[in-house]
Image (cartoon, helix red, strand yellow):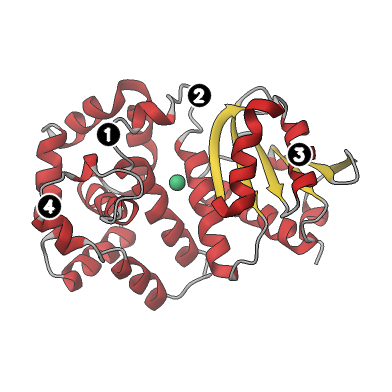
Amino acid sequence: MSYSEDVLETEIIQYSEEVSVNFYKEMNTKFTVSTSVQNNFVTEITKIVEQAKNKWNFSSKKLDIYVVGANRQSVIDLCDVYRNCNSELEPFIFAMKGGDAFYSQKENTYGEEGIIVFFDTVFEDISFKRLAFHELFHAYQFHYADASSIGALQVDGPWLIEGGAELFSEIILYQLGYQTEEKFNSQMELKLLSKEEYLSGNIPLNEIQYGSPLRPYYLGSWFTVYLISEVGYEVYLVDFYEDLHTVGVEETIKKYFSTDIPGVIKNFNNFLAQENDILLMRLNEVLDD
Ligand SMILES: [Zn+2]
């Protein structure tokens, strides 16, 4: 089905033998795609971008999306389109080696911030969608006009930003019917894997680093559940992020929790210490709001 061609006005430019550029004007998105990437993969990404933008209500956010094939020349050609090839080749090579995907606040071709790079690989369908929605949630998190840098919001570790993306990729898969309620719950239960180790240790959630066996993304997704149970779903999605970018992490936490970061982490630890069944109930309550 030519989903995107029916719905959207597109303009396709063949940049080189290895790369083509598709503008999806109504979606405010430009796709730069290695020709070694399968067409159905591109169609799938297009659909996912549109679904994410509709669900999280940020259609106006302008995005550049690069889809990298497993072919070095196509990576170099893509990089050429991306500009500053010398300094910017690195992330593409990283992606080509299986870094999967990343979101960057680098300036895109619309003169705004926001670039997503996907690596074309053999994904199990649902895993790819999960990854795509994760990166798109980062685009959502940083779609505000006065968005601060990712670094500013991840001073100590990935808990807040990655935790949000990790939870919302699961939620949207469930909301759009890509995964059943049972699958959604088992995915979220899986993210409690390092709960006991974390609770019996002495590293606070906000200081767990990328790559730690304590799984900061997973624990962060449960912190996000806690956060939403306290402030509400809509407030988390809208006001909370606006405040993060306007006044920063510490002031935002103070505003919503009347305590500082160590205080909110302590409260989260008490929340997390409940039985897993109770936690899953709290999760479902949060979604019913
Ligand atoms: Zn991420």
Q: Which part of the image, by quadrant, shows the N terminus?
A: bottom right
Labels 1 and 4: the sequence-earlier one: 1
Residues 138 and 7: in front is 138
| Front: mark 3 or 1 | 3
- Asked if residue 66 can be seen in this view, the reply is yes
Label 3 is placed on what type of residue? Ile
Question: Residue 255 at what x, y percent from top left?
Answer: 19, 29
Marked residue nearer the N-terminal end (4 or 3) = 3
Q: Which residue is mark 4?
A: 269
Q: Which residue is mark 2?
A: 145
Q: Is residue 282 above or below residue 266?
A: below
Say which residue appears at 20% left-offset and 47% top-offset: 230
SS for callout 1? loop
- Residue 235 visible here: no
Q: Residues within 10 Å of mark 1 (few under 14, many from 20)?
A: some
Mark 3 lies on residue: 76
Q: Nearer the viewer, mark 1 or mark 4?
A: 1
Rounded to the nearest angstrom, the CA distance separating label 3 from label 1 is 34 Å
Q: Helix, strand, or loop for circle 4?
A: helix
Residue at mark 2 to residue at mark 3: CA–CA distance:
31 Å
Please report contact status of discs 4 and 3: CB closer than 8 Å, yes or no.
no
Of discs 1 and 2, which sits in the foreground?
1
For this view, does 44 lie left or right of residue 61?
right
Mark closer to the observer (4, 2)? 4
Mark 4 is on which residue type?
Answer: Asn
Kindly check if marks 4 and 2 are in contact, taking CB atoms under 8 A apart as contact: no
Q: For the residues marked 1 and 2, what is the alpha-carbon distance in whole angstroms? A: 24 Å
Which residue is at 42% across, 49% downward? 165
Closer to us: 131 or 30: 131
x, y percentage for residue 42? Answer: 73, 56
Q: Secondary structure at mark 3?
A: helix
Residue 237 position within the rendered picture, expressed as x and y whole percent measured from the top left: 38, 43
